[in-house]
């Protein structure tokens, strides 16, 4: 049976964890295939997310690998059970799949999501006008319809996350992102006041890394670190011009946790940041 041509983020992550489980047990793909009574190709497809895995097969793989992390097994079983389509599916075929993957990633997060940006304000806090300003600068240019669709998607993504029970957003931005005028001065001013309003939400914190810090504490790229149902399911998303890049290997996660620790140490407090954003907004002139 041919596999899925485009497995979702959840399906790929389930497969990646199955591969790690097998590799930690020192089993080759052919060895596991014999235990399961399937072909090595099917094992490869399961580990790439291209073939479905039910809970019974998950437990068979766990037993074959002598795997005892019941917390992770339970979380993987939840991934298997969550086969419903997310709200972002209504946009499939209308906007690039990269947008949908970012929305699925935020939905996949079990609780806190940390974001770092250094050039622009993060999508989860953007106003419609600011988002339009960002999309309007794309080369080659987008049509008015394409800009409208991407903007409405970003707005729904923002509203869905901020209204999701149990979700918390921790935003860290470099001061330079407060000055980049996507959409013009008036748009930026209203965007900054919007960030101030969002920053007093119970589930949102915003902290600024000021120009005066000794060094630039984070990467140039924008990154999003989400905490999974268990720590093994934490995920990092890095934004690039070609779409999001996801990282989930244990050493990569540890590296990005250290990166956020360094950013947090360099950032102003929430109150200091709110004051700086307000002062910047009021100082903007056309």
Image (tube, rainbow, N blue to C red):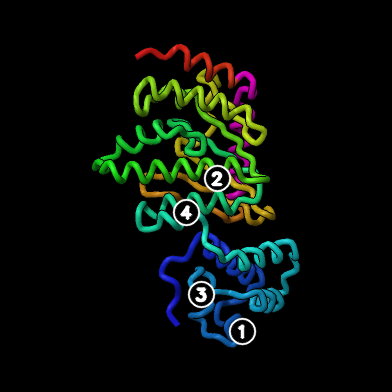
> Which one is in front in this view, the residue at disc 1 or the one at disc 2?
2
Q: Name the element at disc 4.
A: helix
Report the residue marked by disc 3.
Answer: 51
Q: Nearer the viewer, residue 176 or 204?
A: 204
Few, some or many residues within 10 Å of mark 4 (<14, 14–19, 20+): some
- Is 76 above or below relative to 58? above
Residue, disc 4: 88
| Residue at the image point whose x is 36% and y is 52% from the top | 95
10 Å crowding of disc 1: few (<14), some (14-19), many (20+):
some
The residue under label 2 is 160
Q: Residue at x 49, y 62 (%)?
A: 8
Q: What residue is shown at x 50% (from left), y 68% (from top)?
A: 48
Q: Earlier in the sequence, mark 4 or mark 1?
A: 1
Q: Where does residue 197 sit, x and y in percent of width and height?
A: 57, 26
- Sequence-earlier tag: 3 or 2: 3
Residue 16 drawn above or below residue 212? below
- Compared with 1, 85 (above or below) is above
How would you rate the neighbour count of disc 2 (Cα within 10 Å): few for under 14, some for 14-19, many for 20 or more? some
Q: How many marks?
A: 4
Residue segment shown in magenta: 253-272
Lower position in the chain sequence, tag 1 or tag 3: 1
| Mark before the other along the chain sequence, 4 or 2 | 4
Circle nearer the viewer, 3 or 2: 2
3D distance between C-alphas at marks 1 and 2: 40 Å
Earlier-in-chain disc, 1 versus 2: 1
Which residue carries the number 1 mark?
A: 36
Could you tell me how far apart the alpha carbons at marks 4 and 1 are, in whole angstroms?
Answer: 35 Å
For the residues marked 3 and 2, what is the alpha-carbon distance in whole angstroms?
A: 29 Å
Considering every residue shown, the one lying at the far left of the view is 140
Disc 2 on helix, strand or loop?
helix
């Amino acid at each position: 049976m041919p596999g899925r041509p485009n497995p979702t983020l959840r399906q790929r992550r389930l497969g990646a964890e199955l591969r790690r489980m097998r590799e930690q047990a020192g089993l080759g793909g052919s060895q596991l295939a014999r235990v399961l009574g399937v072909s090595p190709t099917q094992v490869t497809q399961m580990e790439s997310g291209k073939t479905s895995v039910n809970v019974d097969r998950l437990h068979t793989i766990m037993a074959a690998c002598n795997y005892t992390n019941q917390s992770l097994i339970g979380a993987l079983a939840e991934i298997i059970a969550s086969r419903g389509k997310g709200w972002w599916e209504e946009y499939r075929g209308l906007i690039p799949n990269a947008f949908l993957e970012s929305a699925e990633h935020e939905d996949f997060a079990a609780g806190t999501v940390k974001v770092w940006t250094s050039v622009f304000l993060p999508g989860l806090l953007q106003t419609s006008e600011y988002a339009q300003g960002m999309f309007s600068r794309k080369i080659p240019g987008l049509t008015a319809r394409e800009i409208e669709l991407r903007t409405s998607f970003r707005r729904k993504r923002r509203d869905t996350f901020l209204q999701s029970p149990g979700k918390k957003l921790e935003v860290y931005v470099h001061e330079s992102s407060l000055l980049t005028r996507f959409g013009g001065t008036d748009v930026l001013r209203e965007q900054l006041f919007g960030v101030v309003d969002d920053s007093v939400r119970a589930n949102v914190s915003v902290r600024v890394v000021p120009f005066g810090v000794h060094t630039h504490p984070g990467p140039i790229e924008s990154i999003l670190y989400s905490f999974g149902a268990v720590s093994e399911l934490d995920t990092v998303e890095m934004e690039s011009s070609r779409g999001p890049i996801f990282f989930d290997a244990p050493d990569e996660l540890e590296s990005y946790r250290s990166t956020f620790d360094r950013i947090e140490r360099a950032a102003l407090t929430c109150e200091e940041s709110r004051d700086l954003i307000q002062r910047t907004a009021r100082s903007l002139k056309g």
